[in-house]
Image (cartoon, grey):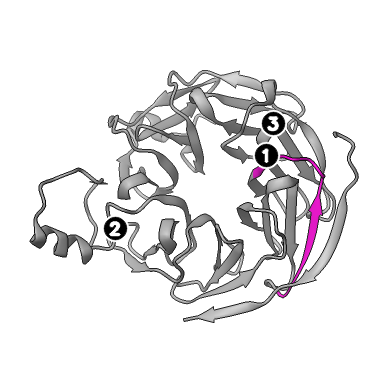
Amino acid sequence: MRNAPLRTWRTTGKAVSLAGLSALLVTGCEAPLNLEAVREQSQQAVKRTDFFQAMARNNRVIVLSGNNGVVLASADNGMTWNRQTPTSDSFLALDVCPDNSFIALTFSNELWHGDAGAETWTAHALPSQEQMMTAACAPDGSWWAAGAFTTIQGSTDQGETWTETSLNEDAILNNLQFIDSDKAFATGEYGLVLTTEDGGENWDYAGYLPDEFYAHSSHFRSADEGWVGGLNGFIYHTTDGGESWEKSRTGINAPIFGFISGPTGLYAVADNATVLKHAGASWQKISTSDQPLYLRSGLLLPDNHLLAAGGRGLLLNLEIPVALSASTD
């Protein structure tokens, strides 16, 4: 299986055109039925029925996407949000492109393209019958998606045509990240770590995670150094491009769902509203809430704040302690 041949196809896709909040913590607490409260809730941009999956930003807006086609956009660092539902399908992944536009993957294998203001979204059908799980925009502006059966798809003409490659392994890829225009990594089921050296034209095995560890999330800082996270609070670290991995101390057993990187260092978000800060060979918990709600994605804000989003409309705006605001990475 490790030396399975690659197979590549080119197909043509079609496009279908479709034309606050200031609290530090928003979550879905149960309360007695109150119709006035229900009406008030229905007018809010963030709802208790939202399950956020991904967050990205450009130089104009922060964008959040999640279940039932919800897309939220904020032009003021998360203080207020504008709500859209360009589709009824659930969004799985979101990324920003070099031209400041956005791409967002849905469960129905459509890649939606949003303008720089996240106001207009257009759907592009993906050619594969395999379920796609993640998406990324490369530094050259090309669009990419990856998912089941180690399938990776790419488009250099904004969804008009696609190339499709598979390593013919019955495994799901759920993380895809470009380091530069040539180098990218994909991680997923059975401890797979894949890489490309030519901008996605060819993919090969970079290495394997210990014990076939399932990587829920991954982040690579360079072609050599990266981290993966998953069940039981496990985070593994590599300094040789994925050939070997060393387990880091996290002090938690909640699943790790995402990484956030920025000027003040590297952070991980997890279940139970947990935020961890990377500190050398270990991780330090900096969140104080233990709500039974997951955090899936986030980004760093000005003035030492971190914004993270997850289940039940959870939006966490966390102030990073001054003692930890200087990067230790």
Q: Is residue 103 left or right of residue 3?
A: left
| Residue 247 image-quadrant placement | top right
For the record, the magenta segment spans 160-173
Residues 28 and 183: in front is 28
Label 1 residue SS? strand
- Position of residue 158 relative to residue 304, above or below, is below
Q: Is residue 194 left or right of residue 105?
A: right
Q: Quadrant of the C terminus?
A: top right
Question: Label 1 sits on what residue type?
Answer: Thr
Residue 266 visible somewhere in the drawing? no
Q: Is residue 21 left or right of residue 98?
A: left
Q: Which residue is mark 1?
A: 187
Label 2 residue SS? loop
Question: Label 2 sits on what residue type?
Answer: Val
Q: Name the mark on residue 190.
A: 3
Q: Residue placed at 28% from the left, 29% from the top?
A: 288
| Residue 145 image-quadrant placement | bottom right
Q: Which residue is mark 2?
A: 46
Residues 106 and 291: in front is 106
